[in-house]
Image (cartoon, grey):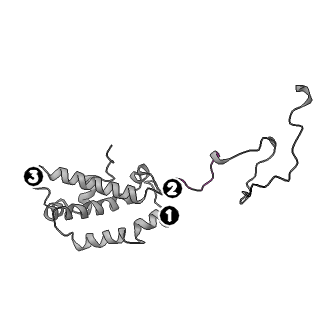
Amino acid sequence: MALAPIGTDEDLEGYFSSYGIASWADHEIVGDPSATVVKDQCELYASSFLAGKLSKRYTYAMLLTAPMMVEIWCVILLRTLTFRRGNPPPASLEFRYQELTQKDGLLDQIAKGEFPLVDENGEPLRPKNSNAPGWSNLHIDRWYPESKVRVITGNSDQTTSRLPRKLDRFPESFG
């Protein structure tokens, strides 16, 4: 199953006019049967590039909800589209691409968590496999069923508990 594009044709034209796409990439020539195929291939490349680069931190479904990813996707797609037929990209597009993809560039900062992504409501996206506490890692010792639960960080040395066991778990009425 192919990845869904992060942006739309309108987004592409917002960053690089349709005249610019046609003049720099030569893919919009009337009667050219490969025009849409090449654009679709470049969309798939840009989507898979972002999915692979950010896969440790975000799922692809999360990237689809981040408005910032539209610009990044458009820049990668347009640069790939212009190079596909041997045309160099405009200097401003190449500069933006280098800002995004260079070592410690914006994509590396997002992948490392130094620059968090937000959704369309401005809420930060929670990275997958985050260290935030969840109910799935909560374990209550069966010997202390009525005790209050408290979190003790750094208690992973596997030593035996020094707390006395509650032996009166089962009332005498059972036996």
Q: Is residue 62 left or right of residue 137?
A: left
Using the rendered image of the protein, determine whether residue 24 is visible from the camera's viewpoint.
Answer: yes
Q: Which mark is residue 32?
A: 3
Looking at the image, residue 55 lies above or below residue 102: above
Earlier sequence position, callout 3 versus callout 1: 3
Look at the numbered disc 3 and give the secondary structure of its residue.
Answer: loop
Is 77 in the magenta? Answer: no
Q: Are marks 3 and 2 in contact (CB under 8 Å)?
A: no
Instruction: Point out the image quarter for the N terminus.
Output: top left
- Residue tagged 2: 127
- In the rendered image, residue 85, in percent from the top left (x then y), is placed at 15, 62
- Residue tagged 1: 113
In this picture, which residue range is highlighted in magenta? 129-135
Look at the numbered disc 1 and give the secondary structure of its residue.
Answer: loop
Rounded to the nearest angstrom, the CA distance separating label 3 from label 2 is 42 Å
Earlier sequence position, callout 3 versus callout 2: 3
